[in-house]
Image (cartoon, grey):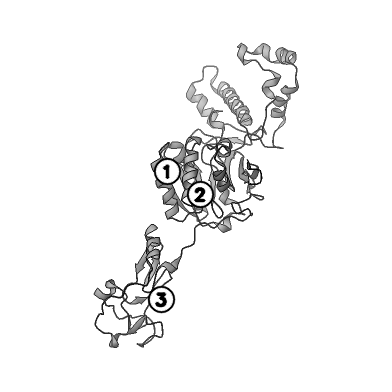
Amino acid sequence: VGGVAPPPSIPQPPIRSTTWRPHLSQVGIVHLADSYGQAYADGFIDNCADLGMEVVSKQFGFNNEASIDVALYFMKKNRINVMMVVMFDDDIEYFIAKANEIGLLGPGKMMVFSDAVSIGALSALPMDLQNALSGAGRVLPVGCVNGETGVLFDHFRSFASKSQSWLDLRLNSRMPYEDWKLTPELMEDYYDVDVSCYVYDAVMAQGIAACDSYAQYGADYTRAQYLEKLQAVEFDSGASGRVEFDSATGNRRKDTGYYVLQNFLFDVSDESSSAPIKGTWNPSGGWDTSGFVFSDGTGSPPASVEPVDYSVCGPGFFYDLVLKTCGACSPGTWSAGGTDQCIVCGAGTVSKDYDSFHASNPGHVSTHGPPPTITDSPTSCVSSSLKQAPQPPVPAARPDSAYLTTVAF
């Protein structure tokens, strides 16, 4: 197929679908630490950036369970619900089992796999893991698209209906080697989700480049001259879409192919799985993912990230969204708890002390707000003229279980 099949990174991830975009602001990608995985991740991150989406990215080593653990716990720590997964079948069972164990699968969660993960590998997982994974997606380039094939390719496909004697007379007599000969059976197996159209267009591209090289340089053209012509080839045979090449990489431009999104579904009634195509991408229309079924059994994508339980942070504290822990309010600010930010005290008031941090830093007069008064807020700030000497610290109103929850982040 050479460089005619699309490169690893898909043209636009399915999250660009108008059905998914309004629901997603932050997504994750877990990928192999190799050139394939990194190229896919780079393309994914670039496309998400165009939409203003934040991407949490983590790589892992092939056949390395410890690094898979690190990558998945990193997604868990960042509360990621929707993630792209770039890996091979070799690691899939351990990866899915671990993800299920730590709560990254099930209703409200979603994984989208690259084409390096086969549906066969997903269908071979234990039943409980298939059920947990139901609602996942798999993106792959599609070689041939119904209704898109052209006259030349259709003629090529018609050889399947020809007799062996017809093929021998018209085509095989010109073949230089015995094992190159065509048979009707060679053409019988043909699927939309296939690379046969890419193979056809790869041969077409090579032939066009050879003709162009001969026309300009004669029979003794060099390999460099041939490559120059190949990278300049542009045509549309109708088989795999318009073919154009990236002169910098030699690969086919990734926005000239076709892609599909499979929907992995598990039916608990008969313990069977399926992977119907529920999304398509083409250069003119982009993604259409209508009909995709998500992990909760509906057509609505899950939330980007798990909501934060601010209630774990008691009075005098706020939830730090970066550090994923409760932090003490700074002097001159206050909090009644259960929030992600502290409130600045009014002019002429200072914050009360809630813990040892405030006992050693008793506060300062705020220059914000109206003239000095004693606030009506729940004993949050007092007039600076009434400020007493620091009192012994009062523990934050946080139960032990809540504290453990914050540490887990």
Residue 129 x/y as whole percent: 54, 44
Q: Is residue 301 visible?
A: yes
Residue topped by disc 1: 68
399 or 330: nearer the viewer = 399
130 or 163: nearer the viewer = 130
Q: What element carries label 3?
A: loop
Tag in front: 3 or 2: 3
Quadrant in which the N terminus is drawn: top right
Q: Are marks 3 and 2 in contact (CB under 8 Å)?
A: no
Q: Is mark 2 on a helix, strand or loop?
A: strand
Q: Earlier in the sequence, mark 2 or mark 1?
A: 1
Tag in front: 2 or 1: 1
Q: In this view, does 178 lie to the left or right of 50?
A: right
Residue 193 x/y as whole percent: 63, 35
Q: Residue at x 42, y 43 (%)?
A: 68
Q: Is residue 296 left or right of residue 160?
A: left
Residue topped by disc 2: 83
Residue 329 x/y as whole percent: 34, 72
Q: How far apart are marks 3 and 1 (CA)?
A: 40 Å
Residue topped by disc 3: 336
Tell me which amino acid carries mark 2: Met
Seen in the picture, residue 194 relative to 186 is either above or below; the reply is below
Tell me which amino acid carries mark 3: Ala
Q: Can residue 45 be seen in this view?
A: no
**Category of crowding for the residue at label 1, using alpha-carbon neighbours closer than 10 angstroms: few (below 14), some (14–19), many (at least 20):** many
400 or 281: nearer the viewer = 400
Q: Distance between the residues labelled 3 and 2?
A: 35 Å
